Amino acid sequence: MTEAETRARILRAALAEFSEHGYHATSVRELAERVGVTKTAVLYHFPGKADIVTALAEPLLDDLEATMDKAEAATDPRAAAIEGVLDVWLSHRYLLRMNLRDLGLTASKAVFERFRDGMLKANVLVAGPAADLAARVRAAQAIAMLSDPVVLFADAPIDELRAAILDGVARLFDTPPASRGRRGRPSVMSPETVEAAHRLYDAGHPAADIATALGVSRATIYRHLPDAD
């Protein structure tokens, strides 16, 4: 077995051990036993466990940085950043799932800093130029929506998972800001909501009360119930 092959086997074993038992609970000796080499052989390639994490994370970080550079030059930086980050997560989904166990990726300072910087750049691209706090928060929410489904459904068909995640993010940005308050409340009602509106109206409730109960505007109620007061 060549040195390159040994190194690759150590990394595969580390990903499996960290995923199953956690980074902090896995010893170098256990990694060596799983690979079938001595502890000294592992330490020859990786002086410490944090060095293993750095090697595991490097492809993900390289992809993330390259993707953000590409998104920065795209016609639509927000869409390019969101889709780019998601594709990176999907490509490295088992490493992300490993990290869920005990945040093992943070064991390496270099990995943490590169990851942080990549996420900050993604936030700037998604939020847009001169974004206020609300826009930056919404960007952070959108970016956060990309990783959890990838981790939770890592074994799902990639194309279906990708489409479902992007649909959820699109809904976040498609929601009119005014819908969070009284003005500009949703103007679309589902068939079930329309039926409920009719029941409330037949029971004698005024349009204003129906609108409040169903979380829509009074104009929407009047459109579906033209005879309402």
Image (cartoon, helix red, strand yellow):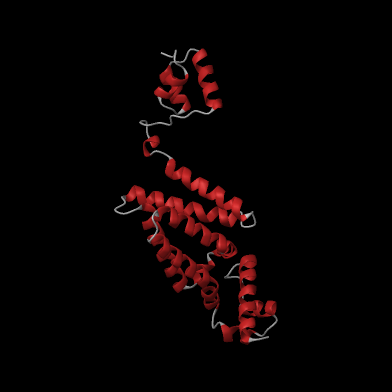
Residue, x 56% and y 82% (percent of image)? 46
- Quarter holding the N terminus is bottom right
On the image, which quarter does residue 129 sit in? bottom left
Camera-side residue of 110 and 219 = 219
Residue, x 49% and y 51% (percent of image)? 145
Residue, x 38% and y 50% (percent of image)? 137
Camera-side residue of 153 and 107 = 153
User: Whole-percent x and y of residue 199?
Assistant: 54, 17
From what the image shows, is residue 125 above or below residue 182?
Answer: below
Give the farthest residue toward the left: 130
User: Whole-percent x and y of residue 195?
Assistant: 55, 21
Q: Is residue 157 left or right of residue 78?
A: right
From what the image shows, is residue 172 above or below residue 181?
Answer: below
On the image, which quarter does residue 37 sit in? bottom right
On the image, which quarter does residue 173 sit in? top left
Q: How many marks?
A: 0
Q: Is residue 155 left or right of residue 202?
A: right
From what the image shows, is residue 219 above or below residue 66?
Answer: above
- Quarter holding the C terminus is top left
User: Whole-percent x and y of residue 10?
Assistant: 63, 78
Camera-side residue of 137 and 67 = 67
Camera-side residue of 73 and 36 = 73
User: Whole-percent x and y of residue 7?
Assistant: 61, 81
